[in-house]
């Protein structure tokens, strides 16, 4: 068993050598000045769905795929078509940072409990709805990303990447995990999710690790190997920082027909209603994206006392802004041909929803069209209806994880109502 402790070589935190040329920053942009509006803590109130569903465009059907979970955050479809669901929620340190309240919590959420398990759903009669449900794994530590490579199931716990022996069709795993690599966690772990993805030939694994804080207010030294996408070999060797300065990268995917990795990034808080936009971006190997020193290119964050002007000059401007405080987290490229042609090759992004904005923002799934592996249009609403009453800050639910089923339909996890929705073309 290979064990690697990653809290070493501080130079890995913000590697300077090898950076690609940054995109030219357009200073005449529409971003307001910091503190142009007051920073607001504005928590939503989750009221549930009763007999309602989210709303999709004409030509689509939205139906309940499964429910009864405990915070279904992320999903993964195995090679044999099983749907794995990671059930976990935030830790105490983040709850304390936002004032002792779980953002978007409803009465069924327990602030002191995380299910820390992976459930398995199987559709044995191929009618599009699972009729078999099993608990595949327990005794995890805030599990999130999942990945099957060969006869191994990898799981991204908040503090480590682990793997288990796995066979297609297996419904319960009782083996002890093999630790592949430690990941930064600890007391300051504001962004606890650890998503994972492999490249086309499964020779590399990429791990998205968010910052431990908002803007490194606990010190840069506490952000070692955070706000990064890490690259390793499947056995845990060969650790590299693939890209850095990404405050909280979560969803990841490969643009169809290309070798470009894309991610959605949940940006910083408390600079006002319209700062800072979350974004979707292609990830350049060795690229630096600003955090914590600057945002959306070379806009300096006035709160960060330590400055790195030479590094800021290398900051890459993201590709697609997604709105400020929308909590854009989930990502799924549409690789099927079942949806209408406009969706082919494009990407869906889930927006979990704001807490730091005077008027709620996000709480929906948007779609960005792609052409020849690059964005070809602005984000457009795809799955809406999560906001029940804007004036009362009431929401039915909050979308987070996204994945595609083999039949071409889209699954959307709603973690605060413990439901997974299925969107299919009529």
Image (cartoon, grey):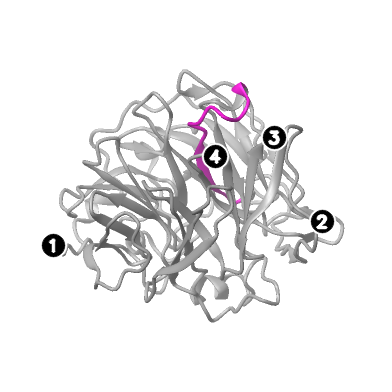
- Residue at (31%, 69%) from the top-left corner? 173
Residue 153 in percent (x, y) is at 30, 57
Label 1 element class: loop
Disc ID at residue 207: none
Residue 297 in percent (x, y) is at 49, 35
The magenta segment: 327-341
Residue 419 in percent (x, y) is at 63, 61
Q: Say which label, 1 or 2, has the lower sequence index.
A: 1
Name the foreground residue: 77 vs 237. 77
Q: Which residue is mark 3?
A: 426
Disc ID at residue 388: 2
Q: Which residue is mark 1?
A: 2
Label 2 element class: strand
- Extreme residue toward the right, this view: 391
Distance from Cα at disc 4 to Cα at disc 2: 25 Å
- Residue at (53%, 54%) from the top-left corner? 303
Mark 2 vs mark 3: in front? 3
Q: Is residue 257 left or right of residue 108?
A: left
Q: Say which label, 1 or 3, has the lower sequence index.
A: 1
**The magenta stretch spans residue 224:** no
361, above or below 200, in the image: below
176, above or below 167, in the image: below
């Amino acid at each position: 068993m290979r064990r690697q402790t990653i809290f070493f070589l501080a130079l890995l935190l913000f590697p300077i050598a090898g950076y690609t040329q940054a995109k030219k920053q357009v200073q005449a942009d529409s971003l307001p000045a910091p503190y142009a509006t007051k920073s607001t803590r504005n928590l939503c109130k989750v009221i549930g769905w009763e007999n309602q569903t989210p709303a999709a465009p004409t030509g689509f059907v939205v139906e309940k795929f499964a429910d009864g979970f405990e915070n279904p955050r992320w999903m993964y479809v195995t090679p044999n078509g099983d749907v794995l669901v990671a059930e976990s929620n935030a830790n105490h340190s983040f709850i304390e940072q936002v004032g002792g309240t779980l953002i978007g919590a409803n009465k069924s959420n327990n602030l002191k409990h995380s299910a820390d398990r992976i459930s398995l759903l199987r559709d044995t009669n191929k009618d599009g709805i699972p009729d078999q449900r099993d608990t595949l794994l327990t005794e995890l530590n805030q599990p999130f990303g999942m990945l099957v490579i060969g006869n191994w199931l990898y799981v991204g716990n908040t503090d480590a990447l682990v793997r288990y022996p796995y066979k297609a069709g297996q419904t319960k795993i009782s083996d002890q995990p093999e630790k592949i690599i430690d990941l930064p966690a600890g007391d300051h772990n504001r962004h606890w999710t650890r998503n994972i993805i492999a490249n086309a030939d499964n020779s590399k694994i990429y791990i998205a690790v968010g910052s431990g804080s908002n803007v490194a207010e606990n010190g840069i030294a506490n952000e070692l190997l955070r706000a990064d996408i890490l690259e390793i070999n499947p056995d845990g060797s060969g650790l590299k920082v693939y890209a850095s300065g990404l405050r909280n990268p979560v969803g990841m995917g490969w643009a169809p027909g290309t070798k470009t990795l894309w991610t959605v990034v949940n940006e910083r808080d408390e600079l006002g209603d319209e700062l800072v936009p979350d974004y979707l971006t292609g990830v350049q190997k060795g690229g630096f994206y600003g955090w914590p020193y600057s945002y959306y290119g070379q806009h300096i964050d006035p709160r960060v006392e330590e400055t790195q002007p030479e590094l800021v000059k290398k900051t890459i401007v993201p590709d697609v802004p997604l709105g400020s405080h929308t909590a854009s987290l989930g990502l799924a490229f549409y690789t099927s041909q079942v949806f209408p042609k406009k969706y082919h090759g494009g990407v869906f992004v889930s927006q979990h929803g704001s807490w730091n904005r005077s008027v709620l923002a996000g709480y929906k799934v948007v779609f960005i069209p792609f052409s020849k592996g690059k964005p070809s249009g602005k984000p457009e609403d795809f799955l809406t209806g999560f906001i029940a009453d804007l004036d009362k800050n009431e929401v039915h639910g909050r979308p987070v994880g996204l994945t595609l089923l083999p039949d071409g339909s889209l699954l959307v996890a709603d973690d605060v109502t413990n439901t997974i929705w299925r969107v299919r073309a009529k």
